[in-house]
Image (cartoon, rainbow, N blue to C red):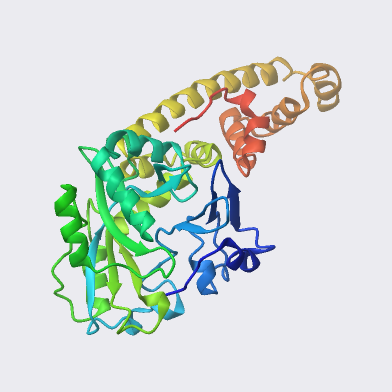
Protein backbone atom coordinates (compact mmCIF):
# COMPACT_ATOMS: atom_id res chain seq x y z
CA UNK A 1 0.00 0.00 0.00
CA UNK A 2 1.06 3.58 -0.62
CA UNK A 3 1.52 5.76 2.43
CA UNK A 4 0.17 9.33 2.15
CA UNK A 5 0.14 11.90 4.95
CA UNK A 6 0.07 15.32 3.31
CA UNK A 7 -1.19 16.92 0.11
CA UNK A 8 2.40 17.96 -0.69
CA UNK A 9 3.15 14.29 -1.39
CA UNK A 10 0.43 14.16 -4.04
CA UNK A 11 0.52 17.50 -5.87
CA UNK A 12 3.89 16.97 -7.62
CA UNK A 13 2.54 13.78 -9.24
CA UNK A 14 -0.52 15.48 -10.74
CA UNK A 15 1.13 18.76 -11.73
CA UNK A 16 0.28 19.62 -15.37
CA UNK A 17 -2.00 16.55 -15.60
CA UNK A 18 -5.32 17.83 -16.87
CA UNK A 19 -7.20 14.65 -16.00
CA UNK A 20 -6.85 15.27 -12.26
CA UNK A 21 -8.84 17.84 -10.29
CA UNK A 22 -7.76 19.61 -7.12
CA UNK A 23 -10.99 21.07 -5.74
CA UNK A 24 -10.64 23.49 -2.85
CA UNK A 25 -13.88 23.38 -0.91
CA UNK A 26 -15.14 25.07 2.23
CA UNK A 27 -12.90 23.58 4.91
CA UNK A 28 -11.26 20.81 2.88
CA UNK A 29 -9.65 19.91 -0.45
CA UNK A 30 -10.65 16.97 -2.65
CA UNK A 31 -8.42 15.36 -5.27
CA UNK A 32 -10.06 13.20 -7.93
CA UNK A 33 -9.73 12.35 -11.60
CA UNK A 34 -12.17 13.50 -14.26
CA UNK A 35 -11.05 11.37 -17.20
CA UNK A 36 -8.57 8.53 -17.61
CA UNK A 37 -5.76 8.43 -20.14
CA UNK A 38 -3.42 5.54 -20.90
CA UNK A 39 -0.83 6.67 -18.35
CA UNK A 40 -3.13 8.31 -15.82
CA UNK A 41 -2.54 5.65 -13.17
CA UNK A 42 1.07 4.75 -13.90
CA UNK A 43 2.20 5.59 -10.35
CA UNK A 44 0.80 4.30 -7.02
CA UNK A 45 0.07 7.88 -5.88
CA UNK A 46 -1.96 8.51 -9.04
CA UNK A 47 -4.09 5.43 -8.38
CA UNK A 48 -5.01 6.89 -5.00
CA UNK A 49 -6.28 10.16 -6.52
CA UNK A 50 -9.88 9.04 -6.48
CA UNK A 51 -11.51 11.10 -3.77
CA UNK A 52 -8.66 11.87 -1.37
CA UNK A 53 -9.66 14.50 1.22
CA UNK A 54 -7.28 16.90 2.96
CA UNK A 55 -7.99 19.35 5.76
CA UNK A 56 -7.08 23.06 5.81
CA UNK A 57 -3.53 22.20 6.89
CA UNK A 58 -3.09 19.79 3.99
CA UNK A 59 -3.22 16.65 6.14
CA UNK A 60 -4.94 13.58 4.67
CA UNK A 61 -8.16 13.04 6.63
CA UNK A 62 -10.19 10.60 4.48
CA UNK A 63 -9.20 7.95 1.97
CA UNK A 64 -11.89 6.04 0.05
CA UNK A 65 -11.16 3.37 -2.56
CA UNK A 66 -8.29 4.10 -4.93
CA UNK A 67 -8.61 3.41 -8.61
CA UNK A 68 -8.99 -0.29 -9.31
CA UNK A 69 -9.44 -2.11 -12.58
CA UNK A 70 -11.44 -4.79 -14.33
CA UNK A 71 -10.02 -8.25 -14.80
CA UNK A 72 -8.49 -8.07 -18.29
CA UNK A 73 -8.36 -4.26 -18.41
CA UNK A 74 -4.62 -3.83 -17.79
CA UNK A 75 -1.56 -5.87 -18.67
CA UNK A 76 -1.22 -6.70 -14.98
CA UNK A 77 -4.85 -7.81 -14.62
CA UNK A 78 -5.11 -10.30 -17.48
CA UNK A 79 -7.05 -13.41 -16.39
CA UNK A 80 -4.05 -15.75 -16.57
CA UNK A 81 -2.21 -13.52 -14.08
CA UNK A 82 -5.07 -13.46 -11.54
CA UNK A 83 -4.24 -16.39 -9.28
CA UNK A 84 -7.31 -17.74 -7.51
CA UNK A 85 -5.14 -20.06 -5.43
CA UNK A 86 -4.01 -17.03 -3.42
CA UNK A 87 -6.17 -15.99 -0.42
CA UNK A 88 -9.00 -13.74 -1.55
CA UNK A 89 -12.64 -12.86 -1.04
CA UNK A 90 -15.32 -12.09 -3.62
CA UNK A 91 -17.86 -9.39 -2.78
CA UNK A 92 -21.02 -8.19 -4.45
CA UNK A 93 -20.59 -4.99 -6.46
CA UNK A 94 -23.51 -2.70 -5.74
CA UNK A 95 -24.84 -0.21 -8.27
CA UNK A 96 -25.00 3.02 -6.32
CA UNK A 97 -22.75 5.80 -5.05
CA UNK A 98 -19.63 5.36 -2.95
CA UNK A 99 -20.02 7.34 0.28
CA UNK A 100 -17.47 7.99 3.00
CA UNK A 101 -17.49 10.19 6.12
CA UNK A 102 -15.19 13.10 6.81
CA UNK A 103 -14.85 15.61 9.61
CA UNK A 104 -15.16 19.23 8.49
CA UNK A 105 -15.07 22.00 11.09
CA UNK A 106 -15.64 19.35 13.76
CA UNK A 107 -18.80 18.07 12.02
CA UNK A 108 -19.11 14.56 10.63
CA UNK A 109 -20.43 14.74 7.08
CA UNK A 110 -20.81 12.38 4.16
CA UNK A 111 -18.91 12.81 0.91
CA UNK A 112 -18.65 11.27 -2.53
CA UNK A 113 -15.39 11.40 -4.49
CA UNK A 114 -15.56 15.15 -5.16
CA UNK A 115 -16.88 16.10 -1.73
CA UNK A 116 -20.23 17.10 -0.26
CA UNK A 117 -22.27 16.47 -3.38
CA UNK A 118 -26.05 16.38 -3.60
CA UNK A 119 -25.99 12.60 -3.38
CA UNK A 120 -23.79 12.77 -0.26
CA UNK A 121 -26.15 15.23 1.43
CA UNK A 122 -29.08 13.01 0.51
CA UNK A 123 -27.34 10.07 2.18
CA UNK A 124 -26.64 12.22 5.25
CA UNK A 125 -30.34 12.96 5.70
CA UNK A 126 -31.27 9.32 5.31
CA UNK A 127 -28.59 7.56 7.31
CA UNK A 128 -26.25 9.75 9.35
CA UNK A 129 -27.81 9.09 12.75
CA UNK A 130 -26.21 9.77 16.10
CA UNK A 131 -24.88 6.23 16.45
CA UNK A 132 -23.46 6.04 12.92
CA UNK A 133 -22.07 9.56 13.20
CA UNK A 134 -20.31 8.65 16.44
CA UNK A 135 -18.88 5.51 14.83
CA UNK A 136 -17.58 7.51 11.88
CA UNK A 137 -16.05 10.17 14.13
CA UNK A 138 -14.25 7.64 16.32
CA UNK A 139 -12.81 5.81 13.31
CA UNK A 140 -11.77 8.93 11.44
CA UNK A 141 -10.01 10.26 14.54
CA UNK A 142 -8.14 6.99 14.96
CA UNK A 143 -7.08 7.14 11.32
CA UNK A 144 -9.58 4.83 9.60
CA UNK A 145 -11.93 5.76 6.74
CA UNK A 146 -15.17 3.70 6.58
CA UNK A 147 -16.49 3.27 3.04
CA UNK A 148 -20.17 2.73 2.22
CA UNK A 149 -22.40 2.35 -0.83
CA UNK A 150 -25.66 4.26 -1.04
CA UNK A 151 -28.30 2.53 -3.14
CA UNK A 152 -31.99 3.20 -3.53
CA UNK A 153 -34.78 4.48 -5.76
CA UNK A 154 -33.64 8.11 -5.43
CA UNK A 155 -30.10 7.20 -6.44
CA UNK A 156 -30.71 4.76 -9.27
CA UNK A 157 -27.96 4.12 -11.79
CA UNK A 158 -29.02 0.94 -13.64
CA UNK A 159 -30.10 -1.67 -11.09
CA UNK A 160 -33.41 -1.02 -9.34
CA UNK A 161 -33.36 -1.12 -5.53
CA UNK A 162 -36.67 -0.99 -3.66
CA UNK A 163 -35.44 0.74 -0.51
CA UNK A 164 -32.70 3.26 0.29
CA UNK A 165 -29.80 1.39 1.90
CA UNK A 166 -26.36 2.27 3.20
CA UNK A 167 -24.08 -0.76 2.99
CA UNK A 168 -20.68 -1.01 4.60
CA UNK A 169 -18.15 -1.96 1.91
CA UNK A 170 -14.74 -1.59 3.50
CA UNK A 171 -12.57 0.46 5.85
CA UNK A 172 -9.07 1.72 5.15
CA UNK A 173 -6.31 2.99 7.34
CA UNK A 174 -6.23 6.56 6.09
CA UNK A 175 -2.46 7.04 6.06
CA UNK A 176 -1.24 3.58 5.06
CA UNK A 177 -4.18 2.63 2.82
CA UNK A 178 -4.41 -0.85 4.34
CA UNK A 179 -7.87 -2.45 4.27
CA UNK A 180 -9.29 -3.79 7.52
CA UNK A 181 -10.07 -7.54 7.53
CA UNK A 182 -13.59 -8.52 6.54
CA UNK A 183 -14.30 -10.29 9.82
CA UNK A 184 -13.63 -7.02 11.64
CA UNK A 185 -16.20 -5.33 9.41
CA UNK A 186 -18.70 -8.06 10.27
CA UNK A 187 -18.51 -7.14 13.94
CA UNK A 188 -18.86 -3.42 13.16
CA UNK A 189 -21.88 -3.92 10.89
CA UNK A 190 -23.58 -6.10 13.48
CA UNK A 191 -23.02 -3.58 16.25
CA UNK A 192 -24.39 -0.74 14.12
CA UNK A 193 -27.22 -2.83 12.68
CA UNK A 194 -26.31 -1.87 9.12
CA UNK A 195 -25.82 -4.25 6.19
CA UNK A 196 -22.34 -5.41 5.24
CA UNK A 197 -21.46 -6.12 1.63
CA UNK A 198 -22.14 -9.85 1.17
CA UNK A 199 -19.49 -12.34 0.11
CA UNK A 200 -20.19 -15.11 -2.37
CA UNK A 201 -18.98 -18.68 -2.15
CA UNK A 202 -15.71 -19.06 -3.98
CA UNK A 203 -16.39 -21.99 -6.30
CA UNK A 204 -13.97 -21.07 -9.08
CA UNK A 205 -10.46 -22.39 -9.58
CA UNK A 206 -9.34 -19.65 -11.92
CA UNK A 207 -10.27 -16.19 -13.19
CA UNK A 208 -11.39 -17.36 -16.62
CA UNK A 209 -14.08 -19.64 -15.23
CA UNK A 210 -15.20 -16.85 -12.89
CA UNK A 211 -15.42 -14.39 -15.79
CA UNK A 212 -17.60 -16.85 -17.67
CA UNK A 213 -20.01 -16.86 -14.74
CA UNK A 214 -20.03 -13.05 -14.37
CA UNK A 215 -20.51 -12.23 -18.05
CA UNK A 216 -23.99 -13.74 -18.22
CA UNK A 217 -25.30 -12.07 -15.06
CA UNK A 218 -28.70 -10.39 -15.33
CA UNK A 219 -30.07 -7.75 -12.96
CA UNK A 220 -26.76 -7.34 -11.16
CA UNK A 221 -23.65 -5.21 -11.71
CA UNK A 222 -20.97 -7.74 -10.86
CA UNK A 223 -18.38 -8.52 -8.20
CA UNK A 224 -15.19 -7.22 -6.58
CA UNK A 225 -12.28 -9.53 -5.81
CA UNK A 226 -9.96 -8.56 -2.96
CA UNK A 227 -6.66 -10.38 -2.51
CA UNK A 228 -4.64 -10.63 0.68
CA UNK A 229 -1.74 -8.14 0.27
CA UNK A 230 0.60 -10.55 2.07
CA UNK A 231 0.18 -13.04 -0.78
CA UNK A 232 -0.35 -10.82 -3.85
CA UNK A 233 2.70 -8.77 -4.79
CA UNK A 234 1.18 -6.80 -7.69
CA UNK A 235 -0.66 -3.66 -6.39
CA UNK A 236 -2.99 -3.55 -9.40
CA UNK A 237 -4.25 -7.05 -8.59
CA UNK A 238 -5.09 -6.42 -4.93
CA UNK A 239 -8.58 -5.19 -5.81
CA UNK A 240 -10.28 -6.17 -9.06
CA UNK A 241 -13.77 -5.82 -10.49
CA UNK A 242 -15.78 -7.97 -12.86
CA UNK A 243 -19.01 -6.73 -14.44
CA UNK A 244 -21.77 -8.52 -16.30
CA UNK A 245 -22.03 -7.79 -20.02
CA UNK A 246 -25.72 -6.90 -19.67
CA UNK A 247 -24.91 -4.26 -17.06
CA UNK A 248 -21.97 -2.83 -19.00
CA UNK A 249 -24.07 -2.45 -22.14
CA UNK A 250 -26.89 -0.74 -20.25
CA UNK A 251 -24.49 1.55 -18.42
CA UNK A 252 -22.72 2.60 -21.61
CA UNK A 253 -26.06 3.22 -23.26
CA UNK A 254 -27.25 5.35 -20.36
CA UNK A 255 -24.01 7.34 -20.35
CA UNK A 256 -24.35 8.00 -24.07
CA UNK A 257 -27.97 9.02 -23.72
CA UNK A 258 -27.17 11.65 -21.13
CA UNK A 259 -25.96 13.73 -24.08
CA UNK A 260 -28.71 15.16 -26.26
CA UNK A 261 -26.59 14.98 -29.41
CA UNK A 262 -26.46 11.17 -29.11
CA UNK A 263 -30.18 10.82 -28.45
CA UNK A 264 -31.05 13.07 -31.39
CA UNK A 265 -28.75 11.12 -33.70
CA UNK A 266 -30.39 7.83 -32.72
CA UNK A 267 -33.87 9.29 -33.27
CA UNK A 268 -32.92 10.69 -36.68
CA UNK A 269 -31.63 7.26 -37.71
CA UNK A 270 -34.76 5.49 -36.42
CA UNK A 271 -32.62 3.41 -34.07
CA UNK A 272 -34.45 4.02 -30.83
CA UNK A 273 -36.25 0.68 -30.78
CA UNK A 274 -32.90 -1.08 -30.26
CA UNK A 275 -31.96 1.21 -27.38
CA UNK A 276 -35.15 1.52 -25.33
CA UNK A 277 -35.03 -2.03 -23.89
CA UNK A 278 -31.65 -1.17 -22.32
CA UNK A 279 -32.97 1.81 -20.35
CA UNK A 280 -34.64 2.18 -16.98
CA UNK A 281 -38.33 3.06 -16.95
CA UNK A 282 -37.61 6.70 -16.07
CA UNK A 283 -34.97 7.14 -18.76
CA UNK A 284 -37.11 5.35 -21.34
CA UNK A 285 -40.00 7.68 -20.60
CA UNK A 286 -37.78 10.77 -20.95
CA UNK A 287 -36.34 9.56 -24.26
CA UNK A 288 -39.76 8.66 -25.68
CA UNK A 289 -41.15 12.07 -24.68
CA UNK A 290 -38.22 13.75 -26.40
CA UNK A 291 -38.69 11.61 -29.51
CA UNK A 292 -42.34 12.65 -29.79
CA UNK A 293 -41.42 16.33 -29.44
CA UNK A 294 -38.65 16.00 -32.03
CA UNK A 295 -40.99 14.30 -34.47
CA UNK A 296 -43.60 17.03 -34.08
CA UNK A 297 -40.96 19.66 -34.75
CA UNK A 298 -39.59 17.75 -37.74
CA UNK A 299 -43.05 17.38 -39.26
CA UNK A 300 -43.59 21.16 -39.07
CA UNK A 301 -40.21 21.89 -40.69
CA UNK A 302 -40.72 19.27 -43.41
CA UNK A 303 -44.17 20.61 -44.24
CA UNK A 304 -42.94 24.22 -44.41
CA UNK A 305 -39.97 23.19 -46.53
CA UNK A 306 -42.14 21.25 -48.97
CA UNK A 307 -44.46 24.24 -49.36
CA UNK A 308 -41.50 26.58 -49.88
CA UNK A 309 -39.99 24.44 -52.61
CA UNK A 310 -43.33 23.75 -54.27
CA UNK A 311 -44.16 27.46 -54.39
CA UNK A 312 -41.02 28.07 -56.46
CA UNK A 313 -41.10 24.91 -58.53
CA UNK A 314 -42.08 26.82 -61.72
CA UNK A 315 -38.95 29.02 -61.53
CA UNK A 316 -35.59 28.27 -63.06
CA UNK A 317 -32.63 27.73 -60.72
CA UNK A 318 -31.45 31.33 -60.83
CA UNK A 319 -34.86 32.83 -60.16
CA UNK A 320 -35.48 30.24 -57.45
CA UNK A 321 -32.30 31.34 -55.68
CA UNK A 322 -32.29 35.07 -56.30
CA UNK A 323 -35.98 35.88 -56.13
CA UNK A 324 -37.84 33.10 -54.33
CA UNK A 325 -35.29 32.48 -51.55
CA UNK A 326 -34.02 36.04 -51.23
CA UNK A 327 -35.29 36.55 -47.68
CA UNK A 328 -34.93 32.96 -46.48
CA UNK A 329 -32.28 32.18 -43.78
CA UNK A 330 -29.12 30.61 -45.17
CA UNK A 331 -29.52 27.19 -43.51
CA UNK A 332 -33.09 26.90 -44.80
CA UNK A 333 -31.93 28.05 -48.25
CA UNK A 334 -29.46 25.18 -48.36
CA UNK A 335 -32.15 22.70 -47.43
CA UNK A 336 -34.51 24.15 -50.04
CA UNK A 337 -31.94 23.57 -52.77
CA UNK A 338 -31.40 19.99 -51.56
CA UNK A 339 -35.14 19.27 -51.53
CA UNK A 340 -35.60 20.83 -54.97
CA UNK A 341 -32.88 18.50 -56.24
CA UNK A 342 -33.92 15.25 -54.49
CA UNK A 343 -37.65 15.77 -54.00
CA UNK A 344 -37.53 14.25 -50.49
CA UNK A 345 -37.86 16.86 -47.74
CA UNK A 346 -37.86 14.42 -44.81
CA UNK A 347 -34.68 12.70 -45.94
CA UNK A 348 -32.88 16.01 -46.51
CA UNK A 349 -33.88 17.43 -43.12
CA UNK A 350 -32.76 14.26 -41.31
CA UNK A 351 -29.44 14.22 -43.17
CA UNK A 352 -28.86 17.89 -42.39
CA UNK A 353 -29.59 17.48 -38.69
CA UNK A 354 -27.43 14.36 -38.44
CA UNK A 355 -24.47 16.34 -39.74
CA UNK A 356 -25.04 18.67 -36.79
CA UNK A 357 -25.05 16.00 -34.07
CA UNK A 358 -21.30 16.08 -33.50
CA UNK A 359 -21.37 18.55 -30.62
CA UNK A 360 -23.99 20.05 -28.34
CA UNK A 361 -23.15 23.49 -29.74
CA UNK A 362 -24.02 22.27 -33.23
CA UNK A 363 -27.29 20.77 -31.98
CA UNK A 364 -28.21 24.07 -30.35
CA UNK A 365 -27.53 25.91 -33.61
CA UNK A 366 -30.15 23.84 -35.49
CA UNK A 367 -32.70 23.43 -32.69
CA UNK A 368 -35.15 25.70 -34.54
CA UNK A 369 -35.61 22.88 -37.07
CA UNK A 370 -36.98 20.41 -34.49
CA UNK A 371 -37.84 22.64 -31.51
CA UNK A 372 -37.42 20.13 -28.65
CA UNK A 373 -35.30 20.19 -25.49
CA UNK A 374 -33.91 17.10 -23.81
CA UNK A 375 -33.35 16.40 -20.13
CA UNK A 376 -32.74 13.05 -18.43
Total number of numbered discs in the rendering? 0
Q: Position of residue 274 (x, y in %)?
A: 36, 44
Q: Position of residue 244 (x, y in %)?
A: 29, 60
**Of the pair 309 and 262, the residue shown nearer to us:** 262
Q: Position of residue 197 (x, y in %)?
A: 22, 57
**Quick check: 38 left or right of 335?**
left
Residue shown at 19%/81% (left/top)?
A: 205
Query: Quarter of the image containing the C terminus?
Result: top left
User: Height in image: 285 above or below 247?
Assistant: above
Query: Quarter of the image containing the N terminus?
Result: bottom left
**Quick check: 235 left or right of 327?**
left
Asked whether residue 4 appears in the rendered view, the answer is yes
User: Height in image: 40 above or below 188?
Assistant: below
**Of the pair 78 and 365, the residue shown nearer to us:** 78
**Of the pair 87 and 100, the residue shown nearer to us:** 100
Asked whether residue 248 appears in the rendered view, the answer is no
Residue shown at 37%/76% (left/top)?
A: 237
Q: Position of residue 52 (x, y in %)?
A: 49, 57
**Quick check: 105 left or right of 94?**
right
Amino acid sequence: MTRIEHISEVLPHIKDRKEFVVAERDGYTAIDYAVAFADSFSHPILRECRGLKFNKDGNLVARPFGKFFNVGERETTQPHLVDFSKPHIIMDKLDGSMIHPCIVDNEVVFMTRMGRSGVARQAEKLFLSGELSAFCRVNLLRGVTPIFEYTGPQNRIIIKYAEPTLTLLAARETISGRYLPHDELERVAASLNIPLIPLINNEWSNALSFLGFVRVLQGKEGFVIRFDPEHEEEPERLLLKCKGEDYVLKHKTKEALHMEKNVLAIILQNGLDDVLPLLTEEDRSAVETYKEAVQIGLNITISELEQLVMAGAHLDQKAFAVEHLANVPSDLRGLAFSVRRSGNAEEEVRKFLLKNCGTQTAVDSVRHFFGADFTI
